[in-house]
Image (tube, helix red, strand yellow):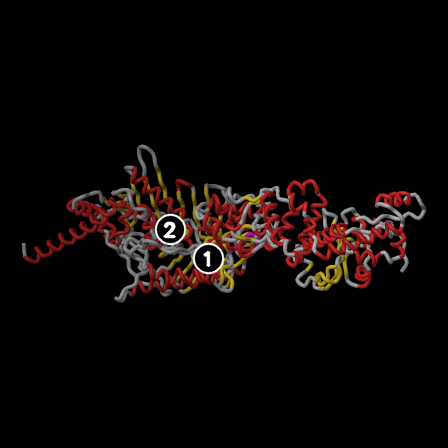
Amino acid sequence: MTYKEKFEASEYRAHYKNIATKILREMTLLRSLVENSPIAPRRWIWELIQNAKDVHQHDGVKIIIDYYKNSESSYISFKHNGKPFTADNIRFLIEQISSKDRDKDTDGKPKTTGKFGTGFLTTHLLSEKVLVKGIAKEPELDYRKFELELDRSGFQLDEITDSVQMSKDSVQDLDIRPIYKEYEEGKFNTSFNYYLTDEIGHSVAEKGLTDLKKCLPYTFVFVEELKKVKVEHSGLLYSNATEYTEIAPNIKALDIRIKEGSGETPWKSLTFAILNKNLTTIAIPIKIENDKIEIIQIDENVPKLFCDFPLIGTEIFSFPVIINNPNFNPTDPRDGVYLTVSQRENPLAEDNKQYVKEAVDLYFELLEFASEKHWDNLHLLAQIKPIFNCPNWISESWFKANVLNPIRNKLLDISIVRTADEDLQAIRHDNKKYIWFPTSTKAKYRNELWELANYWFPYRLPKESDVELWNKLIWKDCGKLTSEQLAAFVENKGSLIELQKVLKDIEPTEWLVQFYDFMEVEDEEFDSIINKRAIFPNQHGNFVKKGKLYKDSGDIEDSFKDILSELGNDIREILLDEDIDFEIGEDRVLDNSYIIKEIISEVNSKANDREIAKNYRPAFKKLLLWFQDKPEKAKELFPTLYRNKHLLYDDEEILDNIKKAEQLNDLLTDLNIKDISQIRSIIEDSKSSSNTVIPVTEQILLNMGISSVEEWEEAIKDKNLAALYSHESTPTTDMFVYVQGLIEKAKTNVISVLESNDEYDLENLDLTTAPTVLAGILKEGKEISIVVRPAYNNEVIIYYGSERDILDYEVSELWIDDGIDPRQISLGHILKSANIVKFPV
């Protein structure tokens, strides 16, 4: 043998050793991945489809896939209608040499996606032996049928080398085989048959077919050469309609048709919204019905990046839509595209990053249009998150700066949240948080938080059915509604009145009790929140901190609270609202005995100094009225004060009473009457006379609104009144005190009702016009006056000239308090109740 022959023999051995080494290395890696990798078992179907696409005929790619499984014989069969094999194709298939090139057509698209390289070895995860059936054809040669077994089952280099040689030997006689005259272009002339011999093969087959069902519709969207795929065993037939519908100038809809079953089974459609920029395409499934477009959820197992075909493993790439570019430069396992940052120049990675940036621009265009047209399920366009534990093909910093942050910033200011009141709002307004997303550790608590907030601001909450969806999407710039945040909102309102203004269909105290109960169960920081925030109403309805409050035992009389307040000790400030059922501590309860002690202490400290006592005349009057109304109880609860109740009158009142006593004594002398009982007899006798006069009582004074001796003396000058009431019936000081208290009570009750009515503005309330007149009130922006009268015996007498003038000449209203329902009295009510059918004008 010559040196030349030895060199050639050595080269031949080296070539086959290299082939065997590469195949064995790849098979060893695949064998180690097949049971543990989530990616490798899914690749085989896409390697077969993309190889079929690379040899498509003029009428496009048609494929038939069959999976047959039983106890005796199981297989996967893959057939396509592509071009015949060339001699190079057969050799590359045997030697596992890739014929893939990156040559591009006139549109800039690569002519092939992949061809028999290492990617094809992933199909051997089904079976390490595959039978290939096909047609060979060279331009100058005849058609020849062939069958070829590829055996990758060896574990040694010699075994792989021998199997490669056997495969080559099996087609060496192609020239002497019969010419295949029945060849028809477009028929299913090529098939790959994998015999499944173990459970791993079945598992790989099923994982690949599952992936096919999820990803094939997207592949139809991106690969126009793909026309039909039939999955024989399941009766599924996929077809590319190739008819676009324009939604907007750069937004089109494409239907992918699917039929399940044979015969007259109707076609179903999956519709995709598609946008293009250069060769970059984004797609998202939609549903169009009655001119309304609804976005459909993308299955989480669908890769987000396609290089015409799915790049299995790019599910980790967080993006709201699917991105395709046929020029992506994928990793060798086709599980990603390089998006890395390096100090060295890397044109392939830079190209990939440019395609992703184009996809971001297309996404913004889709987002703006979908928001403007109020597409349903807009939250699905917000599905983007940071990528943790980034694979080696992604730079985390690049992703944040160029994808995540720009998209999230866009999402904040575009109307994308369907609110609880069925409006569409942006996450923030004027750079401030607007939508509040219920946030808690459990879905149950998030729902309860939503229900509480829905009474208050439904226009700033996501739709109830979207709460869980948004909970998975929101980030730090979004408004997170927690127990703490809701407590801050309550504190900011300041009072029950202000809270009532914003709550719908629920009383504020009822809502607060529900909120307290919720926090106690849901929030570990419950104690911190309730001690830090002023969220508990006192008996004035103002919110204060829990530490400043005591619980009302329930036996405290309201009149005592009033008296103590007039004495400068407003006990309602520190008493929890009686409608709030909340434990604030066993030792923090106040009862009636405590209040009585406080009243006694306050009175003793203030009544001893006559100058100081003048300032507390209203309190003393109220206490005296209570003594008069309940004398026995007064003796029991306030024995000393009751015995010395004269101390509760100031000097002016005492002198006034002495004066009245002297006047009464003079009257008795003038009438030659020894005691008051005789006056009573005279009055009783006069009842039967025709000129009956009525003795003056506290109730009569109350009906007339007269609260002083001077007012009574002025009133009795009126001839009509003088004829009705006895001149000798002189009211006592206690009677006037009683009347004053009830008039004040009526005014207080009416003012309280007016303050709770949005029609009335009492900011400039004037109480000085007359004892029973409220002036300076605005109603719907116009000033009015209100005459207030007690009507505790269901009767009112209009005596004051000032009252009559106000009711006659000014814009005014008449209000009464009957002890049950303070209310306005209309002219119609007066006419009906007094049976007035005519009157002078």
SS for tag 2?
loop
Quadrant (top left/top right/bottom left/bottom right) for the C terminus: bottom right
* Label 2 neighbour load within 10 Å: few <14, some 14-19, many 20+: some
Evaluate whether residue 807 shows in this view: yes
Q: Is residue 404 left or right of residue 588?
A: left
| Residue under label 2 | 186
Q: Quadrant of residue 805?
A: bottom right
SS for tag 1?
loop
Q: Say above or below: 772 vs 66.
A: below
Q: Residue 478 — which label?
A: 1
Quadrant (top left/top right/bottom left/bottom right) for the N terminus: bottom left
Q: Amino acid at mark 1?
A: Cys
Q: Amino acid at mark 2?
A: Gly
Q: Of residues 690 and 412, which is closer to you in this image?
A: 690
Q: Is residue 418 magenta?
A: yes
State the predominant SS element of the stretch in magenta: loop
Distance between the Cα atoms at labels 1 and 2? 56 Å
Whether residues under marks 1 and 2 lie with C-beta atoms below 8 angstroms apart, the answer is: no
Location of residue 644 in the rendering, given as x and y in whole percent from the top left corner: 67, 47
Location of residue 182 in the rendering, given as x and y in whole percent from the top left corner: 34, 47
Q: Residue 688 — which label?
A: none
The range drawn in magenta is: 417-422
Q: Of residues 315 and 431, which is closer to you in this image?
A: 431
Residue sitting at the far right: 690
